[in-house]
Amino acid sequence: MHTTVGIVGGGPAGLLLARLLHRAGVDSVVLEARDRAYVERRQRAGILEQATVDALRAAGAGARLDAEGIPHDGIELRFDGQAHRIDFPSLTDGRRVWVYAQTEVVKDLIALQLADGGTLSFGAQVRAVEGVDTDRPVIRYLHEGREQTLTCDYVVGCDGFHGVARAAVPAAERTTYERTYPYSWLGVLAEAPPVYEELIYAHSDRGFALASMRSPHVSRLYLQVENGADPAAWPDERIWDELDARLALRDAPGWRLRRGPITQKSVLPMRSSVTEPMRYGRLFLAGDAAHIVPPTGAKGLNLAAADAIVLARAFARWAANGSTELLDAYSATCLRRVWRAEHFSYAMTTTLHNDPAQSGFDTRLQLSQLARIADSPHAAAELAQNYVGLPLDSPA
Ligand code: FAS
Ligand code: PHB
């Protein structure tokens, strides 16, 4: 089988890229290792930047998002027993974010891809990407018990942090910059109506907590835990008690979360990683295949979408007039945005979490930075503009 663009991985990056290419008249094939139910059920991100929402609408996948997505105009920071709201529109020329889970984005893109054309194969385990330094790269994969081959004009690795595409770049030709954090997140999904209108990010001497949501009836909540923590060591009552303790307010001692059945628990390690360049010969890397951020800044999914948008524009230009100018600029264009998001995610993470090795001096620095954001419109604007996402064409 042959296609113009072979896409390894059917997560947000691969699926959005396929849809945007289809709209530009560029044919592609998406090869996804897992089955449809698995990828649609995988709990991950929850916040979409405006640029991501605009791209999903442009790809024809905005109907349910417009009907069920929840626009948010700010977040709340809690520290030292106090609450401080960061308003987005007034600090970002009117921009906001949307609460719409990655699971729903993936469902919408899969439904569209299957209905509207374009090949999407589930259970297609890519074994190797070869010949990326030739004009006829090849993807070798196992599907329905048989070894298969897909020849392409170009290959895009959208197969996440643990995928195989990145390895097709010779080790001597790529550099990976990374940092791991001395803590993880325990993420829970609860059938409990959020008692808060907007997301709450909390710094406390017991550790970080985040109160998010999936709908008016479902809460998505996170607690900083030690690396290697076992979700089984966190019975529901312990989770609720710890969340209430970390979100406590000095002037509202009765403030509590609404409790309900916890339906999912998982521990997520915190990691930053960037592989440069994001292109080698006829291979491009997009999304988590190229970069990972700690989820504190809600950037992971949005970075993946931004890569897909930039790459789709580049392929559209190439298909229209043969120019490879934007394809040749892809890596540098994306890495500017990636490093901006890496810094923002690192800053949010290290300011809000308790490193087990940190001193009292370090904690005072965190509280000083949080107080600066609460008191200074300039400092608040820097957080707000990074959180809602810098415009795609802005020099990050
Ligand atoms: P993905 O990992 O989503 O998709 C890659 C796809 O490639 C997968 O479907 C995989 O099955 C497939 N694949 C892998 N190897 C393959 C092979 N050899 N052959 C074929 N297919 C293959 N971001 C946030 O902003 N907020 C969050 O709260 C948040 N929580 C997260 C929790 C977890 C547990 C993880 C792992 C990530 C989280 N993220 C979060 C980040 C996450 O949303 C990613 O940024 C996002 O999924 C990136 O999308 P993709 O690049 O498409 O990669
Ligand atoms: C989520 O709702 O899953 C979420 C929201 C904001 C974050 C991370 C995760 O920073």
Image: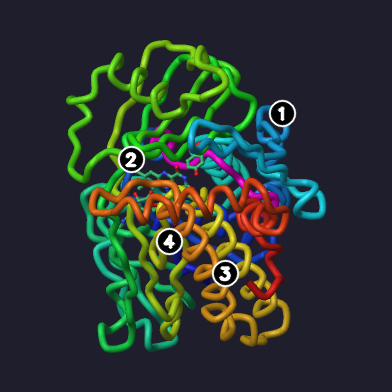
Residue 343 visible somewhere in the drawing: yes
- Which of the two discs, 4 and 1, labels the residue nearer the N terminus? 1
Residue 22 falls within the magenta-colored stretch: no
Task: Establish whether ligand 1 lies closer than 8 Å to the Cβ of label 2.
Answer: yes
Q: Which residue position is annotated with label 1?
A: 67
Q: Nearer the viewer, mark 2 or mark 1?
A: 2
Q: Quadrant of the C terminus?
A: bottom right
Where is residue 306? Give x, y as percent.
Answer: 59, 61
Q: CA distance from mark 2 to mark 1?
A: 30 Å
User: Contact, CB < 8 Å: mark 4 with mark 1?
Assistant: no
Taking depth in this image into account, of 331 and 116 the one nearest to the observer is 331
User: Contact, CB < 8 Å: mark 2 with mark 1?
Assistant: no
Q: Which residue position is annotated with label 3?
A: 337
Q: Which residue position is annotated with label 4?
A: 158
Q: Quadrant of the N terminus?
A: bottom left
- Which of the two discs, 2 and 1, labels the residue nearer the N terminus? 1
Where is residue 61? Give x, y as percent.
Answer: 66, 43
Please name the amino acid that badge 1 sits on: Ala
Q: Residue at x 67, y 48 (%)?
A: 375
Q: Quadrant of residue 307?
A: bottom right
> Which residues, given as a range, are shown in magenta?
40-51
Q: Secondary structure at mark 3?
A: helix
Q: Secondary structure at mark 4?
A: loop
Please name the amino acid that badge 2 sits on: Trp
Q: Nearer the viewer, mark 4 or mark 3?
A: 3
Please name the amino acid that badge 4 sits on: Cys
- Which of the two discs, 4 and 3, labels the residue nearer the N terminus? 4
Q: Quadrant of residue 114?
A: top right
